[in-house]
Amino acid sequence: ERAAPGPKAARSSAAEPATVVGRTLRLGCNEWQPYVGAAGAPEEGFAVDLTREALRRMGWKLDFRTRPWARCLEEMRRGTLDGVLCAYRVPERRWVFGRVPLGLGPEWSDEFVILRRRGSAWRYRSPEDLKSARLALVSGYVYPEPIAGRLRAGGSGLALVTGDDPTTRLLELVAMGRAEATVEQRLPLEAVLSSRPDLRSKVEEVGTLPGWRVYVALRPDYPNAEAVMRELDRRLLEVYRSAEFGRILGRYGLRPAASAPGPTAGGHVPAP
């Protein structure tokens, strides 16, 4: 997505450093636990907490807003959001991305899981089988091939969902038989299934695809965007290296990937 035309981006200069005190960054995302929860909730998600702490170290504040993903994209185009959390860094998106991901560590990445309804006649043997399956997907998301090709072709045979909690809706469509399968990253998938045993009993994992990291991204006309993202990257690395990182993850029953690749009690960290 490319932001709508707007005022020319302010040029970087020594007179306007990225760390100006009092600036507020308006970022949106749909609910995608444990990365992102509802804005204002006691637990807004560890990606929100990571970003807020990094911005605090810059002297900035975070104005986080829960939105359906498609609405986040529209608000970025209109300039009422400065950017988004947990975006995939792919060529289709002409945004200003950071280089430090949001995750269980700066080198960690999740994987895509393919699920079908238990007892379904549909079989998964290779990614080729995703070319014709009735898939439940999230509107506005970017997916790996061959799913991306189907979306470019118009999305025939796909059930597209939106809303603030799309992962749950994906699983519900598969559980009801309205889609043969869905594809979602493991961490948010396990977060939903751990709280919805009714859904866990109706779906099953049949395969995986290599995962992608997720990042903070700003609209391309955001003033001084490149300098802001460079400073945010530097501060995110500080947070990852600090004791605060473990405390942030601990609020969600998670641990840093490097020291604990398996789940904590009650947590959702996938097995390696």
Image (cartoon, rainbow, N blue to C red):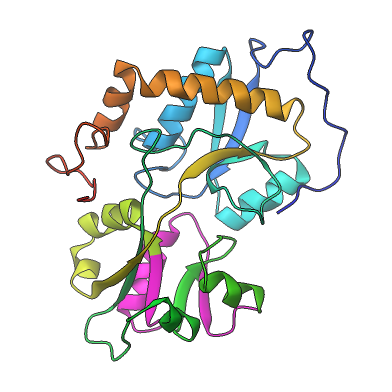
Q: Is residue 50 above or below residue 203?
A: above
Q: Is residue 85 above or below residue 182?
A: above
**Residue found 45% across the figure and 78% down from its top:** 135
- Please state the horizontal and vertical placement of residue 102, each as a whole percent of the image: 44, 37
| Relative side of 129 to 62, left or right | left
Q: Which residues are magenta?
A: 154-183
Is residue 165 inside the magenta stretch?
Answer: yes
Horizontal side of 232 relative to 255 (left or right) equals right
Report the residue at 32% width, 19% height from top. 244
Q: Quadrant of residue 129?
A: bottom left
- In this view, the residue in front, 137 or 206, is 206
Q: Looking at the image, is 114 positioned above or below residue 236?
A: below
Task: Answer left or right for 147 relative to 187.
Answer: right
Q: Position of residue 23 (x, y in %)?
A: 65, 18
Q: Is residue 193 visible?
A: yes
Q: Specify the quadrant that holds the N terminus.
A: bottom right
Q: Could you say where residue 221 lies in the image, as x and y percent from the top left?
A: 78, 37
Furthest residue in direction bottom, as rendered: 121
- Relative depth, front residue between 218 and 191: 218
Q: Position of residue 91 (x, y in %)?
A: 65, 54
* Residue shown at the point (64%, 10%) measured from the top left: 21
Seen in the picture, residue 121 relative to 210 is either above or below; the reply is below
